[in-house]
Image (cartoon, rainbow, N blue to C red):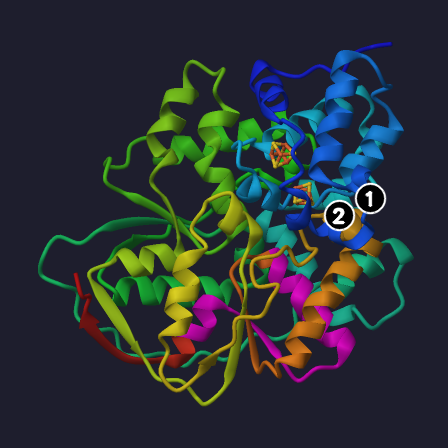
Amino acid sequence: MERLSLSDGAVFELEHCNKCGFCLPACPTYQETGSEVASPRGRLSLVEAAWRGEIEAGQGLADALSLCLGCRACESACPSGVRYGRVLEEARAALYHRRPAFTVRHETVPMLLDLVRQRRRFRRLVRLGQWGRSLPMPRRFKAAAALLPGPRPRLAPKPMPPAPSAPRPRIWFFTTCVMDTAYREANDAAVALLRAAGAEVIVEPDQGCCGALHAHSGREEEARAMARANLARWRHLPDDTWIVLHAGGCGAMLAEYDYLLRDDPEWGPVAARWAGRVKDFATALADLPRRPVYAGKGERVALQNSCHLVNGLRQGGAPVEILQNVPGDTFVPVPGQDRCCGSAGVYNLNEPGMAQRILERHVDEVRTERVDVWIVNNPGCGLQCEAGVRQAQLPTRVWHLAEYLYDRWTGEVTEAAR
Ligand code: SF4
Ligand code: SF4
């Protein structure tokens, strides 16, 4: 039997799993099924058995790994520090190389992975899909069109406070392909707030994709090529520049380029230089010298924290802290706040049944808590949560954190307390 090929790094992670099972309660697919095969420990055991040549590295293994969200909640729960995500992505890549059909479940996924690299075309197709989503269309496009976002909130222009006279932190703002395509207003709002908070923000046109969707789908070589293209843009920036973005999934990817390119003698050291300089929008906002002054509107606000922001980038605290401090609104900490919503990149296309079950749990919590505004900080979560409230016919609005904060911003700023 042919063994599943894995790098030393992935084998190191496998060998450090002592099968204690502490990660099981944190795993959404285990919570839904109660099945060991749908748990982190079960998946690690299967990959290890395929690596040892004890089981076939075929469709059964691919099915078990496909049902994993890749949310990495198991990593945060693991007392031994096993980096499950590394094992998952390498095993998926090995299966993809063996036979692409093992990992591709929905026929629109390869098309989507090509489209995210062509932003203008992607944007045109998104608009077309939004306009024609209620019209008859081939069944294979229906599922993707149903996830497209509705109209965004209108954000009125606000007078910008003068820039601070002291040297300002420099930010290179990564627009990310899905945010730039489906949620451009949220990016504009994020940039305005970062500037108001005292940053010098550089927004380069014609940026590339981070490669996260490709890495999660086993297409590691394509992800590496995208990583190198992004690093080439940053290579000549001063060392103290922050790379800031408003998409948790992409942020975790950028911060882990050093692992992705660890065997690349040219680009590995460049990636290592930038790994610690990636900040999510909320973290950057909290670290800047000025604070925007907010005024709430008497609404109940909940957060769907991006799982890769929480478990990958490990910056899930800043959005909570900011939302807790908007006077006039009530922040409602829903039980599933940090649990994956079922979007997980292209998971909701590949595994629609499980994605829907997971989403419904969240929507139930939002309904119970009578949430007016459900905040997201990753574009995939935005699409998924919006589809959930649409299906459930809830009056809840799904807004990106930057859209919400910009809406509540009075136009004033204060010095940050240090
Ligand atoms: S991944 Fe960590 S928590 Fe889960 S079984 Fe292995 S050692 Fe235990
Ligand atoms: S990544 Fe998420 S879904 Fe996959 S095993 Fe870990 S906790 Fe479960």
Reading the image, the residue beneath label 2 is 30
User: Is residue 183 found left or right of 87 in the rendered image?
Assistant: left
Question: The residue under label 2 is which amino acid type?
Answer: Tyr
Residue at 40% x, 28% y is 271
User: Is residue 114 found left or right of 333 in the rendered image?
Assistant: right
Q: In which quarter of the image is the C terminus?
A: bottom left
Residue at 70% x, 52% y is 28
Question: Is 403 one of the magenta-colored residues?
Answer: yes
Q: What stretch is highlighted in magenta?
A: 380-405
Question: The residue under label 1 is which amino acid type?
Answer: Ser
Question: Is 184 one of the magenta-colored residues?
Answer: no
Is residue 96 visible to us here?
no
Residue 264: x and y, percent?
A: 47, 16
Asked whether 307 or 185 is in front, the reply is: 307
Q: Whereabouts is ligand 1, in terms of quadrant?
A: top right
* Chief SS of the magenta region: helix
SS label for mark 2:
helix
2 or 1: tag closer to the N-terminus:
2
Q: Give the CA distance from mark 2 to mark 1.
A: 6 Å
The residue lying furthest to the front in this view is 20
Reading the image, the residue beneath label 1 is 35
Residue 315: x and y, percent?
A: 42, 51
Mark 2: C-beta under 8 Å from nearest atom of ligand 2: yes
Q: Residues within 10 Å of mark 2 (few under 14, many from 20)?
A: some
Number of marks = 2
Q: In which quarter of the image is residue 155?
A: bottom left
Q: Residues within 10 Å of mark 1 (few under 14, many from 20)?
A: few
User: Is residue 387 found left or right of 123 in the rendered image?
Assistant: right
Contact check, label 2 and label 1, Cβ < 8 Å: yes
Residue 10: x and y, percent?
A: 60, 21
Q: In which quarter of the image is the N terminus?
A: top right
